[in-house]
Amino acid sequence: MNKYDITVIMPGIKPENWSTIYDDIVGSVGDFSFEFICIGPYDPPNKLLKKENITYIKDFGHPSRCLQRATTFAKGKFMTWGSDDGTFQPMALARCIQFLERKDRKDALTIRYFEQDANPDATPPDQSVLWDAHYHRDLRLPGIREHFKIANIAMYHLDYYREIGGIDCRFEHVNMNCNDLAFRVQEAGGTIFPSPEIVIKQTNVPTKTNGTTPIEDAFHENDYPLFHSIYHSEEGAKNRINIDYDNWKQVPEVWTRRFGEIEIPCIVTRYDKQSDNRGEFWGILNDFNAKEVNYVTTKRGEIRGNHFHSYVTELVFLLKGKMVVEAHDTRVENPEKFVFNLKAGEGIKLKPYFYHTMKYKTNCEQLSILDQAFDPDAPDIHRI
């Protein structure tokens, strides 16, 4: 028995938009019940989390992994998804649900959307052909049948979505694998119908930003080459209609295109030490772009840290005493635990998302060196 009529999934990186999108969904589903599952690296506003039909899942994987993983939590009869720069139109989801309730469980809707680019008053493209696969030159491949419809965003019966295996998470972005899923559904005998009306109006600014660059790189370097390798053959989806639903578990937990390679913490030492009758010279570091340096003293038995940073890299360098640093990556479910015993003249570099705790075995003096200056209005300190 389904708890909700529909599950709406938001794999995204702009939680500041999610409250508005939630309100849009309320107006779009009408009298139908819904749940809103948000998944991504950044926490949603607290007021959103207080709602009973909200689920938030923290995940640093690529968008496809996030979407597929979110469906494992879903409790709706139907499921769909959106992007966090789009708006659901009034009563549009309600009419989609009403339409799909009269169809076979294999049938689905391609959710019609309008990308407004930079002009919100732009005229929508010709809807009569836009959702035909062969209307698009790059989809005129031997393995894509002439009558196939595309479905970049879709609405499915959740049980059939799971049965057929959902999206293929070898694709990184939620795009080509959505069409791949639609082609597999059609190859299995299902029909993809255009939604009764435009459901989402979406802002699409055609420029490279820090947010869009990983997506564009994924498309050109991985997703389209993979898609082409499948559909350049006439077999296309025939031999892979059903795939492993748990395939999201086979891809990395951290999307390196957006979040970088996982850099394991390591001990750093002085690059130079000299002494004479005048005293000592310590060369502490010469390869770190420091924006802030702090001198810290701590008494024996005390504990510092117990937090992580989301964008700041911190180098802790011990000048005097002995300490233990424990660290683990907060982006993965079962992280490896790292323990470092530091003595004077040694330090440790802690990259973003590494939760760290510092335990002091003796009275200690240390430098805390940051690659970003501390901002009291937006402190990059996060506790679990």
Image: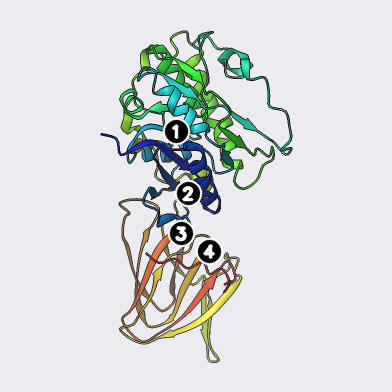
- The residue at which mark 2 appears reads as 261
Q: Secondary structure at mark 4?
A: loop
- The residue at which mark 3 appears reads as 47
C-alpha distance separating marks 4 and 3: 27 Å
C-alpha distance separating marks 4 and 1: 36 Å
Q: Is residue 348 above or below residue 206?
A: below
Precedes in sequence: disc 4 or disc 2: 2
Provide residue 93's location: percent of width, then percent of height: 49, 33
Question: Looking at the rendering, which quadrant does residue 79 occupy?
Answer: top left
**Kind of residue sitting beneath label 2:** Glu
- The residue at which mark 1 appears reads as 80
Provide residue 115's location: percent of width, then percent of height: 64, 33
C-alpha distance separating marks 3 and 2: 33 Å
Task: Assess whether mark 2 and mark 3 are in contact (beta carbons under 8 angstroms).
Answer: no
Quadrant the C terminus occupies: bottom left
Foreground of the two, 379 or 316: 379
